[in-house]
Amino acid sequence: MARPFHRELEKYRNLDENELLGRLSEEELKQLETVLDDLGPESATLPAGLRQRDQTQKAATGPFDREHLLLFLEKEALEQADREDAVPFTGEKKGRVFIPKEKPPEPRQEEKVTLDPELEEALASASDTELYDLAAVLGVHGLLSTPESDEATANDKAGRGPVRNVVKGEKVKPVFEEPPNPTNVEVSLRQIKANDPGLQEVNLNNIKALADMLRVNRTLKSLNVESNFITGAGVLALVEALKENDTLTEIKIDNQRQQLGTAVEMEIAQMLEENSKILKFGYQFTKQGPRTRVAAAITKNNDLVRKKRVEGERR
């Protein structure tokens, strides 16, 4: 079924183009040529200045010379008189000079420290040497000067008197010791290599251990090696072993002696993307890329487990 606008075009199908062109005048033919050049350029990738037809009627006065043109423009600019200013510039500064107001220093209020009467009495009766020893115990001895050093520097050549040490204090970060780990490494390794079905979980926290046994073990479900002295090379060996293990579902390797680095984190991400059995992975990634990949891999593995469980319930 022909569309309405197709029917209107049917009357132009059998027209004689030569007859139509023969009826046009010379001016109309030039106008038609200009329109056709604009509609269908030789190359659509050419700049607009090169695609357009030159319609200049004036004859060329000579070859184009860029340096000659620049010299001519510069000469014309120098010969043209500048426009006079409505108000001539004299360089005179008018108005008052701005002077910022000085703010008075804010008085610093010292914090009052209240000690027990016994401590105040002990500090009041302590000698300078005892005070310096106490400061050394507290780690602030760099802020004080011993009586011996004051006496040695009191009469120096420059006559400047005693020189006191000044250091920047840092807040002490407490480090809490972890409880001892009762795991027997040798017995655990023998059980792992022997595929002991009674061994389902091993905690190697705070113990220097290797992970080569993961290549042969097929019963272990959870592995914890947090707070250890495993380097990046050791973690890489663990990752390579996990590529051949399909029984572990939970691994914790966080809080090692040093940061693992971007290369190791990328290897961890690749391993988790290939191993669909690991459902939990304990490690704080330092880079956004591996962190995102690992989160997606763990989510995918948990979804697979959930789908299998739902299919089993339906059966």
Image: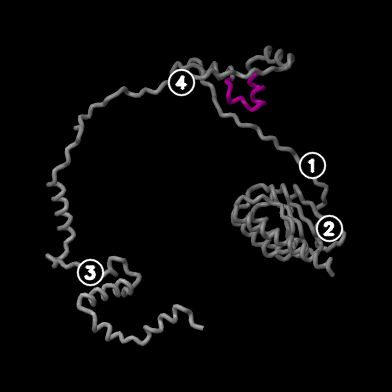
Residue nearer the viewer, 110 or 10: 10
Q: CA distance from mark 1 to mark 3?
A: 91 Å
For label 1, count other residues whose C-alpha is less than 10 Å away and answer few (under 14), some (14-19) or many (20+). few
Q: CA distance from mark 3 to mark 2?
A: 87 Å
Q: CA distance from mark 2 to mark 1?
A: 22 Å
Would you say 158 lies left or right of 128 here?
Answer: left
Q: Nearer the viewer, mark 3 or mark 2?
A: 3
Disc number placed over residue 179 in the picture, else none? 1
Q: Nearer the viewer, mark 4 or mark 3?
A: 3
Residue 11 percent across, percent down from the top left: 38, 84
Name which of mark 1 and mark 4 comes first in the sequence: 4
Residue at left offset 16%, top offset 53%: 73
- The answer to whether 254 is drawn above or below residue 21 in the figure is above
The amino acid pointed to by label 3 is Asp
The magenta-colored residue range is 130-145
The main secondary structure of the magenta stretch is helix
Residue pushed farthest right? 198
User: Which residue carries the number 3 mark?
Assistant: 54
Name which of mark 1 and mark 3 comes first in the sequence: 3
Residue 95 percent across, percent down from the top left: 29, 23
Marks 2 & 1, CB-CB < 8 Å contact: no
Name which of mark 4 and mark 3 comes first in the sequence: 3
Residue 87 percent across, percent down from the top left: 20, 32
Name which of mark 3 and mark 2 comes first in the sequence: 3
User: Which residue carries the number 2 mark?
Assistant: 200
* Local SS, label 4: loop
User: Which residue carries the number 4 mark?
Assistant: 103
Q: Is residue 264 visible?
A: no
- When asked about the image quadrant of residue 30, the answer is bottom left
